[in-house]
Amino acid sequence: MSDQVDNKYRYPVVLILLGLSGSGAALAIAHCSGKDRIVDRSAELRSTTELRTQHTDAELRTGQSLSPHIPDSTELVERPVQRDPRARDYDAARLYATSWSDGQGIFQAEPRKEPWASQREQQVRDAITDAFRSVDEDAQISVECRTSTCSVRVDSPSRLLNGELDQFPLVCISSFVEPDFHPEAGYAEHYVIFGGDNLSSEGFEKQRSEECAKWRDAFIKRRDATATDAGSRD
């Protein structure tokens, strides 16, 4: 049994997910670019707290990493991962966390599902616009949602928006954020991944992440420092 693979994107396809071995490591048989290989999933089984702390500390220092929303280790291996976005048990956040760490690929593979897509587009715009425009009041923000993921594009000459800020405010509303920066072209595109109870309109929260306050503080500090530097040059 295998998934149909679009050669344009050369998606990695996880075929079989095994349970815990005696050593506590999980193994998966994977197919990637036509070659079978064994993938050690032991890193995914480390303490959730440890991973969240490491990610958050690194992100606050550099502004470059994944969202600190790390699924519980038992959740990663207890059931097969659904890749079909039309399936009832499809969970984009779990897919991203366990076997397909390609936010753009997941987004492009999803069909548009209404009314979720339209509702989530408005929710995302309402949640992020003020933060981005506090950096550049003329920033152009476009949001496109599909089944469980959204693409957020920010057009701005500000390097803070088109080449540096990959987390706040999107980290506060989603399970994962994957940035794609294009400073030379003056824009950034973020792939925002939702899952679990955060899929429903009622479950959508502007401050879903426990780390949101830390990210907001880091954002404000960098924004104000950038504005001060620009003012001193003028």
Image: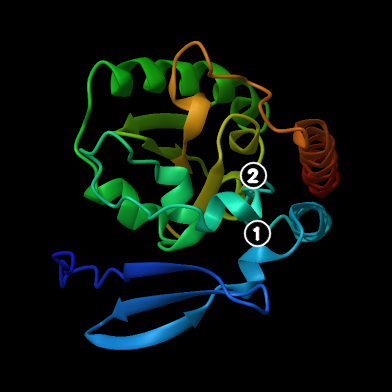
Of all residues, the one furthest to the front in this rendering is 22
Q: Residue at 51% x, 26% y: name it.
A: 198
- The image quadrant of residue 44 is bottom right
Q: Mark 2 points at which residue?
A: 167
Helix, strand or loop under label 1: loop
Check the image and report above or below for 23 versus 96: below
Q: Position of residue 4 (x, y in %)?
A: 13, 65
Label 1 – label 2 distance at C-alpha? 8 Å
Q: In this view, does 131 lie above or below 47?
A: above
Q: Which amino acid does label 1 sit on?
A: Ser
Residue in the image at 51% along x and 41% along y:
156
Type of residue at label 2?
A: Gln
Q: Is 181 positioned to the left or the right of 49 in the image?
A: left
Q: Nearer the viewer, residue 226 or 41?
A: 41
Contact, mark 1 vs mark 2 (Cβ under 8 Å): yes
Seen from the viewer's position, the closer of residues 180 and 187 is 180
**Which mark is drawn over residue 65?**
1
At 67% from the left and 26% from the top, the residue drawn is: 134
Q: Can residue 137 be seen in this view?
A: no
Q: Position of residue 185 (x, y in %)?
A: 42, 56
Whole-percent x and y of residue 159? Answer: 61, 51
